Image (cartoon, rainbow, N blue to C red):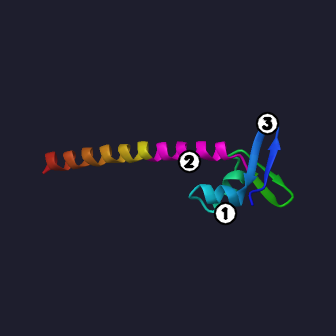
Amino acid sequence: MDESLEISGSTYHTIKAAAEQFSYSRDYITRLAREQKIAAVNIGRRWFVELDSLRQYVEQTSYEQEVRKRQLSEERKRELLLRSVRE
Protein backbone atom coordinates (compact mmCIF):
# COMPACT_ATOMS: atom_id res chain seq x y z
CA MET A 1 0.00 0.00 0.00
CA ASP A 2 1.46 3.35 -1.05
CA GLU A 3 0.62 6.14 1.31
CA SER A 4 0.72 9.55 -0.26
CA LEU A 5 0.00 13.12 0.81
CA GLU A 6 -1.27 16.08 -1.15
CA ILE A 7 0.39 19.32 -0.08
CA SER A 8 -0.14 22.60 -1.98
CA GLY A 9 -1.12 20.75 -5.14
CA SER A 10 1.88 18.40 -5.08
CA THR A 11 1.69 14.72 -4.26
CA TYR A 12 4.29 13.26 -1.93
CA HIS A 13 4.93 9.51 -1.62
CA THR A 14 6.70 7.48 1.03
CA ILE A 15 10.41 6.86 0.77
CA LYS A 16 9.62 3.16 0.43
CA ALA A 17 7.43 3.80 -2.64
CA ALA A 18 10.11 6.04 -4.16
CA ALA A 19 12.81 3.40 -3.59
CA GLU A 20 10.66 0.77 -5.27
CA GLN A 21 10.15 2.98 -8.33
CA PHE A 22 13.76 4.16 -8.67
CA SER A 23 16.97 2.20 -8.30
CA TYR A 24 18.06 4.05 -5.16
CA SER A 25 18.03 2.76 -1.60
CA ARG A 26 15.71 4.22 1.01
CA ASP A 27 18.74 5.55 2.92
CA TYR A 28 20.05 7.38 -0.14
CA ILE A 29 16.66 8.95 -0.92
CA THR A 30 16.38 10.03 2.71
CA ARG A 31 19.80 11.64 2.47
CA LEU A 32 18.78 13.49 -0.70
CA ALA A 33 15.68 14.73 1.14
CA ARG A 34 17.68 15.87 4.17
CA GLU A 35 20.17 17.68 1.93
CA GLN A 36 17.22 19.32 0.12
CA LYS A 37 18.34 17.99 -3.25
CA ILE A 38 14.81 16.74 -3.88
CA ALA A 39 11.41 18.04 -2.79
CA ALA A 40 10.41 16.24 0.39
CA VAL A 41 8.62 16.77 3.67
CA ASN A 42 9.31 15.21 7.03
CA ILE A 43 6.24 14.48 9.10
CA GLY A 44 7.08 13.03 12.46
CA ARG A 45 9.76 10.49 11.67
CA ARG A 46 8.56 9.74 8.13
CA TRP A 47 9.78 11.31 4.93
CA PHE A 48 7.54 11.85 1.93
CA VAL A 49 9.05 12.60 -1.47
CA GLU A 50 7.70 14.28 -4.58
CA LEU A 51 8.43 11.70 -7.30
CA ASP A 52 8.80 14.28 -10.09
CA SER A 53 11.54 15.97 -8.09
CA LEU A 54 13.35 12.66 -7.65
CA ARG A 55 12.93 11.87 -11.35
CA GLN A 56 14.47 15.24 -12.27
CA TYR A 57 17.36 14.58 -9.89
CA VAL A 58 18.00 11.18 -11.51
CA GLU A 59 17.93 12.69 -15.00
CA GLN A 60 20.21 15.57 -14.01
CA THR A 61 22.80 13.36 -12.34
CA SER A 62 22.77 10.96 -15.29
CA TYR A 63 23.41 13.87 -17.64
CA GLU A 64 26.21 15.22 -15.44
CA GLN A 65 27.84 11.78 -15.29
CA GLU A 66 27.72 11.47 -19.07
CA VAL A 67 29.27 14.93 -19.54
CA ARG A 68 32.03 14.12 -17.03
CA LYS A 69 32.67 10.78 -18.73
CA ARG A 70 33.13 12.53 -22.09
CA GLN A 71 35.44 15.13 -20.52
CA LEU A 72 37.61 12.44 -18.96
CA SER A 73 37.75 10.57 -22.25
CA GLU A 74 38.95 13.69 -24.05
CA GLU A 75 41.56 14.33 -21.35
CA ARG A 76 42.88 10.78 -21.68
CA LYS A 77 43.12 11.15 -25.46
CA ARG A 78 45.13 14.37 -25.07
CA GLU A 79 47.42 12.72 -22.51
CA LEU A 80 48.09 9.79 -24.83
CA LEU A 81 48.78 12.15 -27.71
CA LEU A 82 51.24 14.16 -25.62
CA ARG A 83 53.03 10.99 -24.50
CA SER A 84 53.36 9.74 -28.06
CA VAL A 85 54.75 13.12 -29.23
CA ARG A 86 57.33 13.17 -26.40
CA GLU A 87 58.56 9.65 -27.10
What crowding class fits label 3: few (fewer than 14 Cα within 10 Å), some (14-19), or many (20 or more)? few
* Residue wearing tag 1: 27
Q: Where is residue 43 in the image (x, y as percent from the top left)?
A: 85, 54
What crowding class fits label 2: few (fewer than 14 Cα within 10 Å), some (14-19), or many (20 or more)? some
Find the residue positioned furthest to the left. 87
Q: Is mark 1 on a helix, strand or loop?
A: helix
What crowding class fits label 1: few (fewer than 14 Cα within 10 Å), some (14-19), or many (20 or more)? few
- The reply, left or right, for residue 28 in relation to residue 3 is left
- Report the Cα–Cα distance between label 1 and label 3: 26 Å
* Residue wearing tag 2: 58
74 vs 3: above or below: above
Q: Is residue 46 magenta?
A: no
Tell me which numbered mark, 3 or 2, is placed earlier along the sequence. 3
* Residue wearing tag 3: 9
Q: Nearer the viewer, residue 46 or 21?
A: 21
Q: Nearer the viewer, mark 3 or mark 2?
A: 3
